[in-house]
Image (cartoon, grey):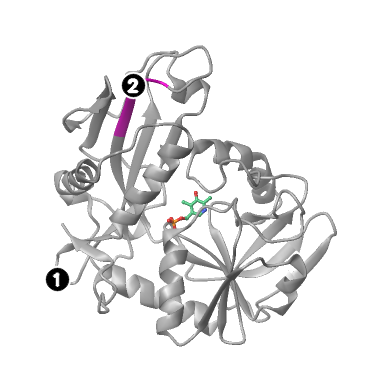
Amino acid sequence: MNIEWGNLPFGYFKTDYNIRCFYKNGQWGELEVSSSEYIPMHMAATALHYGQEAFEGMKAFKGKDGRIRLFRWDENWKRLNKSAEGIMMPEVPKDIFEKAVKEVIRLNEKFVPPYGTGASLYLRPLLIGTGAQVGVKPASEYCLIIFVTPVGPYFKAGFKPVKVQLVRDFDRAAPLGTGSIKVGGNYAASLRASERAHAEGYSTVLFLDAKEKKYIDEAGPANFFGIKDNTYITPESVSILPSITNMSLKVIAEDLGLKVECRRVPVEELNTFEEAGACGTAAVISPIGEIFDRSNNTSFVISKDGNPGPISTKMYERLLAIQYGDYEDKHGWVDFI
Ligand SMILES: *Cc1c(COP(=O)(O)O)cnc(C)c1O
């Protein structure tokens, strides 16, 4: 096996095994190891017709000591069950989830990128309704699958600010809809806005709250944050997916002596931030240099010199250092495989 670890994209790369568990007759079965990349499924499965599909994303890292570290998997487990509850799928017991994530990493150990390459092993758990249903109702059969894929450093060109596009003519999620859970339907709803933004030269979209169109909501597939007056500010909203990266950055911000505010962030406030970024598992932090309001043809320039701000940089480095085992894990976020 000859993998160019430093040149891996953030994309799909075939590994040896995935793990599956099937729910039938009201209970979960045994974990099954598979080397197939395909899922045999009934054509009337609810995942295909009515969007009974939720997923997670997390990473495992190889440290300098050669040991594999998995970051906050229990938070992913809790969130998967919130998603499951939100679209009427069965809860996944903690022991099944834990065994599955750890086993799938061990089975694919040779795909965990070496320390120092900036790469990591991405885990993608998937919970889908596989039972047939034509009327609109939840399935009676489900499948949990976890596959892994090695992913490269998100920023090939280095940790550099990106331009994002604020959109007013699309919504990702409604206030009483499914924005706060990690389901595929939210992504389908965001595709037109995000593909248009890419085509127009922006790395992602910034959505506003769907009801009042006044407050910052989600930054594409990531949470938004702004920094000013030694304070880390991140939007509070019923339609934002609670990012585990954001949850961790709030703690790191406090560790670094910042205040933390989780509250509504009006669009006008964008002008006042000294730094801003989008956060999520894939990139940890994407610093935001400029926000273009597409409908008003105006820009909020955050990074004047084209470089990431000092606080975002420190937070980014600290979180990565904890994940790779280079900095003390004083909050108990890392589990060894
Ligand atoms: C997964 C996701 C995030 C980031 O969550 P992390 O747990 O930090 O990876 C943010 N927003 C949306 C919409 C997501 O689906």
Q: In which quarter of the image is residue 332?
A: bottom left
- Numbered disc 2: secondary structure: loop
Which image quarter holds the C terminus? Answer: bottom left
Residue that extends furthest to the right in the rendered view of this protein: 296
Q: Name the residue rendered at 73%, 73% in the picture.
A: 269
Q: Which of 103 and 195 is in front in this view?
A: 103
Q: What's the mark number on residue 141?
A: 2
Magenta range = 139-144
Q: In terms of depth relative to the viewer, which is nearer, 284 or 224?
A: 224
Q: Residue at x 38, y 14 (%)?
A: 42
Query: What's under tag 1, amino acid-wise?
Result: Asp
Q: Does the residue labelled 1 lie within 8 Å of ligand 1?
A: no
Report the amino acid beneath label 2.
Answer: Glu
Mark 1 — residue? 65
Q: Residue at x 60, y 41 (%)?
A: 177
Residue 311 locus on image (x, y percent): 51, 82
* Dot placed on the residue nearer the N-terminal end, 2 or 1: 1
The mark tally for this picture is: 2
| Residue 200 spot, x, y in % from top left | 71, 51
Check the image and report above or below for 243 versus 159: above
SS at mark 1? loop
Residue 74 visible to an observer of this rendering = yes
Give the quarter of the image for residue 289.
bottom right
